[in-house]
Amino acid sequence: MLYAMHISEGILPIDWASLWFLVAAPFVFLGLRAIERRRRENPQAVTLVAMVGAAIFVISCMPIPVPFAGTCSHPCGTGLGALLIGPGPTVVVASIALLFQALFLAHGGLTTLGGNIVSMGVVGVFSAYGLFHVLRRMRVPIFAAALAAGIISDWATYATTSFELSSALHGDGSFWRMFALILVAFIPTQLPLGIAEGLVTALAYRFVLDRRPDLLAVRAVPDIACDGDPHPDLLEASTGSQPITGADV
């Protein structure tokens, strides 16, 4: 099948496929450690992680074939996951979702799993997480920061996919020409999808923050790319005199 969701099975040569597995492996390992640390600190955190994993699986199962790219456009959900449960656990649940899709839905592939994890589960996650926190430290409103995080997560995922495909397949031709062609092929579908995903991310994050800020409090537990300080939005949402921290949940 030429147009499978994510990067199709067999599209990447074995050396490039192996490279992306090596890149993805430490992020998955650190994410597993973060989940275990969360479980010991607060068993309820595992339930939220599982729910986010299920959401990512469903959200990313909506393929729109992209001609000439050997892949598909689709929403990812990893930006929202990064804001709700943090980057480490989101890498893990995204990897599991990608594995199940490859095994049972023929979406993506086993040999290209590493590349798909890097694009959707690593770059998509950390771009959203990093941008959101930078914007919040700049006092950008929560909704706008989450909107930007959702958009950049989606677009960064597809920029990375374009990079992976062009790196492996440009042959004797120009890398930059192939990269530009693949990137442009994504624009008609991914430009509106990214904006839509940003809106969904902002609405969902704002909803959870307003209704159940205690669920986000598990984010205060130290994590990779997280210094352990209380989440800034928890301080804003808390109505008590004391901020909510991971130890209070």
Image (cartoon, grey):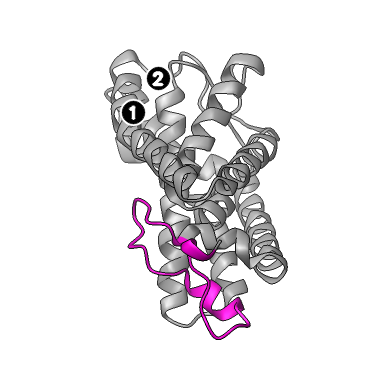
Marks 1,2: beta carbons within 8 A: yes
Most distant residue in the bottom direction:
241
**Amino acid type for the residue under numbered disc 1:** Trp
- In this view of the protein, can residue 28 be seen by the observer? yes
Quarter occupied by residue 237: bottom right
Relative image position of residue 130 (x, y in whole percent): 40, 61
Q: Which of the 4 image quarters holds residue 205?
A: bottom right
Describe residue 211's horizontal placement relative to residue 170 as left or right: right
Q: Tag 2: Cα neighbours inside 10 Å, few (<14), some, or many (≥20)?
A: many
Query: In the image, what residue occupies the spot 54% across and 63% down?
Result: 217
Q: Between residue 128 and residue 12, name the one nearer to us.
A: 128
Asked whether residue 3 is in view, the answer is no
Residue that mark 2 sits on = 12
Identify the residue shown where x is 33% and y is 41%: 176
Which x, y percent locates residue 241?
A: 55, 86
- Seen in the picture, residue 198 relative to 155 is either above or below; the reply is below
- Amino acid at circle 2: Leu
Residue stretch rendered in magenta on the structure: 220-248
How far is the residue under mark 1 from the one under mark 2? 10 Å
Q: Which residue is mark 1?
A: 20
Along the viewing direction, whichever of 202 and 225 lies nearer the viewer: 225
In terms of secondary structure, where does tag 2 sit?
loop
Which residue is depicted at the point 54% across and 70% down? 145
